[in-house]
Amino acid sequence: MRHSTVLLLILLPGLGALSARAQTGQNVGDTPGGNRSRSVHLIRIYDEFGHLVRPDDRPLMPFSPKETCRKCHDYGKISRGWHFNAADSGVSPGRKGEPWILVDPLAATIVPLSYRKWEGTFRPSDLGLSPFEFLTRFGHHVPGGGVGELAGETEDYMRWQVSGPLDVNCQMCHNGDPAQNQAEFGVQVMRQNFRWAAAASSGFATVQGSASEMPDNYDLYSAVPPEASDQIAPQVAYNASRIDPAGRVFFDVPRRMPPSQCEFCHSTRVIDPAHPERWEAEEDVHTAAGMTCVDCHRNGIDHLIIRGYEGEALERGSSGAAGFTCRGCHLGGENDGVPREGRHSAPRPEHRGIPPVHFERLSCTACHSGPWPGGMTFRVKTSRAHALGIPKSDTSADALPPIQSPVFALQSNGTFAPHDIVWPAFWAYRGTAGLRVIPPAVIRPLVASLPVDTTQSAASRRVLRPSGIASVLHRLHEMDSSAGEPVYASGGGAYTLAADGTILRRPATEARPYLWPIAHDVRPKEQSLGIRGCTDCHATDAPFHFGVVGVSSPFVAIPDSIARMTDYQDASPLAAWLFSASFLFRPGLKALVIASFLLIAAVVALYAMRGLFQIIRTLSSEEE
């Protein structure tokens, strides 16, 4: 009886946790208890098959964040979060964001890709990219999950068996260990070491070898070494000092992660010849004030992270999301029952002297975000587009793809906001449904004889002259005359063959540039547009309306048309110029209005005094 009592006392805490889980439908780690202290994650690690990992196992398997974390957390719910659900066709795409950009310099191809239904992007499958090939190209900045868990597909089935799945890498966002190495994760993914990538980046394990060098029939459980002696099969080794006698590993999981954890995938570098040094650049004003990304971009266990744009609350059906926009933090809502402004001591802006129409037609970011605009857009590099942070990535200023910023464009909600812009360049067949992109692998042999430009960057690129474009288009027609009219889309237009063998340029919707709004880096109020007066935006040469947008066609050796900001603002250049020119006379008009007011006031006062004197005189005569 005594032994039964002792056993019951031992099991009671666990039974209580199980009971709470059964009642709430949540895993024990997802049940909010109200305690704000940090949970200590001293836990055992498990491989992708749910087996406990022991240092003396043979073969020694990499631990799986999915199987390790799901012991306490609802992985199914987490894996449907915003960072992982792009391939889910049932998820609303939300506001347009940065795409993945396929770049093939030797095929003269630049194509914005997305699994989300963002207008202006292509699906990876449109270019013949399977999920496995997509990860091999772009997985260096993918947090896992979603596309990485499509290993059951028949396409590339054998390669998936060698590489393993790329599950959600929880550590990418939640590991506070300084040894957490995001770049190593990217390197391992590019080696097709999907199942090993999380362990390699964890800080307590090392991985050698490359799954990409293994044959399709490679078996990681087999003791048979690879056929080639110089090939090393993927293998993991753990730091024994990090595993306690009970087989547990300590994971440093702070409640608030530093901005650097997010910045690995969300960094932008502005290529400004006037400020080439890194130390000359400024960080976001919120980060400089000590805030972290998750102070605004919050989420629950569902990991549907708040993106923070106007209208998101309505799209999500969550009124609470409105409090995490620029207006929500600094101004609050008109119908808030409880004051919402002032979050994290956000100051309430006064905007003295600014006409109210500005707050109807401009997003907050139009004045406060991105680089201060110049006469021409700047070239920028982003983590995802240029593999920033990955060893041996192209660090040159002109590395492809050529992204320009800021472009003050009109959004679908009727407001103007700063955007990044990229110009597609690709070969395609024109059919009844529009342009059908031709995969770069098909194009490379056709352009192999064209010259290569190696003067600008480490990434060699084809140089396309009119005769070269015509030659390739002619060969594409010979290859498949029934596929439609061959075209080359570049610089916002489509080049086609004329009857005499020359090329013609025509408009093409699919060739238009892809723009996505930017919100960071936020400048302090002293550096916001308008701080020096109306002419920051309304001078006849102000960048807001009259800046030149770089039309980047890195392959075509003939000049493209010049684009201006007004091309993206639903306004004519003449109307914008006349409106801006009026500001030249506004100081004089203001002086004239003030002078006229004073003159009228003086006349009114004079006649009022005369009237008063007349009344006094009349009253005096009556008394006599």
Image (cartoon, rainbow, N blue to C red):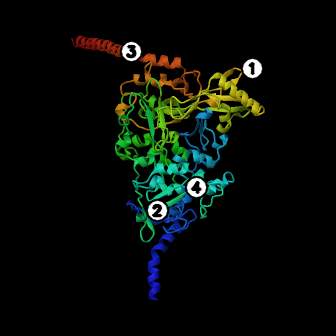
The residue type indicated by label 4 comes to Ser
Mark positioned earlier in the residue sequence (2 or 1): 2
Q: Which residue lies furthest to the right in this view?
A: 482
Q: How crowded is mark 3: few (under 14 residues within 10 Å), some or many (20 or more)?
A: few
C-beta proximity under 8 Å, tags 3 and 2? no
Q: Name the residue under label 2.
A: 238
Mark positioned earlier in the residue sequence (2 or 4): 4
Give the label, 3 or 1, closer to the camera: 1
Give the label on residue 499, or none: 1
The picture quadrant where one finds residue 163 is bottom right
The residue type indicated by label 2 comes to Tyr
- Give the vertical position of 558 relative to 225 (above or below): above
- Residue 337 visible in the current orientation: no
The residue type indicated by label 3 comes to Leu
Q: Mark 3 points at which residue?
A: 589
Between the C-alphas of marks 1 and 4, the distance is 57 Å
C-beta proximity under 8 Å, tags 1 and 4? no
Q: Mark 4 points at which residue?
A: 229
**Residue 322 in the image: x percent, y percent?**
47, 44
C-beta proximity under 8 Å, tags 2 and 4? no
The picture quadrant where one finds residue 526 is top left
Which quadrant would the C terminus be assigned to in this image? top left
Residue 44 vs residue 50: left or right? left
Q: Residues within 10 Å of mark 4 (few under 14, many from 20)?
A: few
Give the label, 1 or 4, closer to the camera: 4
Give the label, 2 or 1, closer to the camera: 2
Between the C-alphas of marks 2 and 4, the distance is 25 Å
